Amino acid sequence: MRNKIINDKYTDYVYEAFDIQNKEETIVEIPVNFHDCKTFDWNIGVIYGGSGTGKTTLLKKFGLIDDFNFDNNKSLISNFDWLEPSEATKVLSSIGLASVPTWLRPFNVLSNGEQYRAKLAYLIAKADTNDTILVDEYTSVVDRDVAKAMSNALQKYIRRENKKIILASCHFDIMSWLQPDWIYSPIKGRVERPDCLRREDIKLQIYRCRTSAWAIYKQHHYLTQELNEKSNCYQIDWNGKNVAFIAILPFPGVGDEKTRRISRIVVLPDFQGLGIGKKLIDYISGLYLKLNHQMYIRTMNPAFGIALTKDIKNWEATSSNLKIPGPDTSGRKLIYRPSYSFKYIGPIIDDDTRMIEMKSESYQYWHVNDLSLF
């Protein structure tokens, strides 16, 4: 790659100080050999290398890198106006941006992680069947744990929809989460097909917490931000970061006095796409079952409802699944539209249940249970 030098006093200083001979042009040689990736089927490719190695130049060999701006006068989801609303929600959820309140906010008020996912969703949704999606500087502006969650959601969606995407990145920590079909290094100058890249274990810490912890999560819940003060509440951390929140209440009128329901479940947007929410409700429900508490859940989140529908080993649809509720006789505020409704039928989780049995006045002792996600 040749570039003409525009000479001035600054370039003259460099020539004299460092004895540069060529004063007319700069030459950068970037080996280009993508032939091998045309010899096998693939969905995800990565051009990997440090700054200045020519990743962007190589990426452009596959086509134009799309540049676009969101309309900040519209809600995020309204920027996907070439799709049907149901398809727009599906794309956003599949890329790990499943926080319903986020869909209603303009792009410019979202966090870095949310904005990055929104851009990925837009690029993916705009791509035609035979297009190759090109993404430069992948995950360069987001927290590394956020990058892992995002990569996991992205690779699942790309493979499920059988699309092609090439990402240029200087970060190797995402590789095991992307599971790319090929990696190209400008330094090596060849396509390599990586062996199985083992993802690191994710260990979540689950704490019993006060209802005041809800303040961190309430703006991301798609229903009311209110929380019943009688809830048993749990906070989930990963690498010292707040990740998720779950609240449990008695379920009057269903089963017996030990019957419980999941009244709130929120995974913060930066950590969606790892399956934390589903893993968490399975774990908590099995833990409660050890104490003979039967667990139920009702949700209108389509991605969550579909995940529960598919998991026939752990969750069974109730008679009210996808039906409009009848007249309210329980004193609870019901929403009169179809929702997903399930009962936990999975195994008992034989872990320490002290945090379930704790009384609210004993919170100076917050018991911790560890949960491995992968």
Image (cartoon, rainbow, N blue to C red):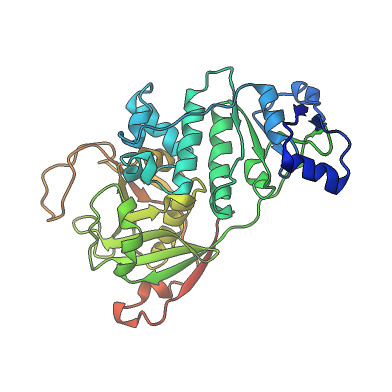
Percent coordinates x, y for residue 116 in the rendering: 49, 41
Residue 117 place in picture, x, y as percent: 48, 40
Q: Is residue 220 left or right of residue 254?
A: right
- List x then y, in percent, for residue 279: 48, 53
Q: Quadrant of residue 231?
A: bottom left
Number of numbered labels in the structure image: 0
Instruction: Please name the residue shown 29% across and 39% down the image.
Output: 321
Q: Nearer the viewer, residue 139 or 158?
A: 139
Q: Residue at x 33, y 28 (%)?
A: 85
Compared to 58, does 207 lie above or below? below
Quarter-of-image position of residue 288: bottom left
**Relative to 242, is 360 on the left or the right?**
left
Residue at point 58%, 25% (across, down):
163
Q: Is residue 50 visible?
A: yes
Residue 76 position in % (x across, y down):
36, 36
Which one is in front, 367 or 102? 102
Q: In the figure, 287 relative to 359: above or below? A: above
Quadrant of the image containing the N terminus = top right
- Residue 96 is at least partly visible in this image: no
Residue 39, image quadrant: top right
Q: In screen coordinates, is 36 left or right of 124?
A: right
**Residue closest to the far front:** 9
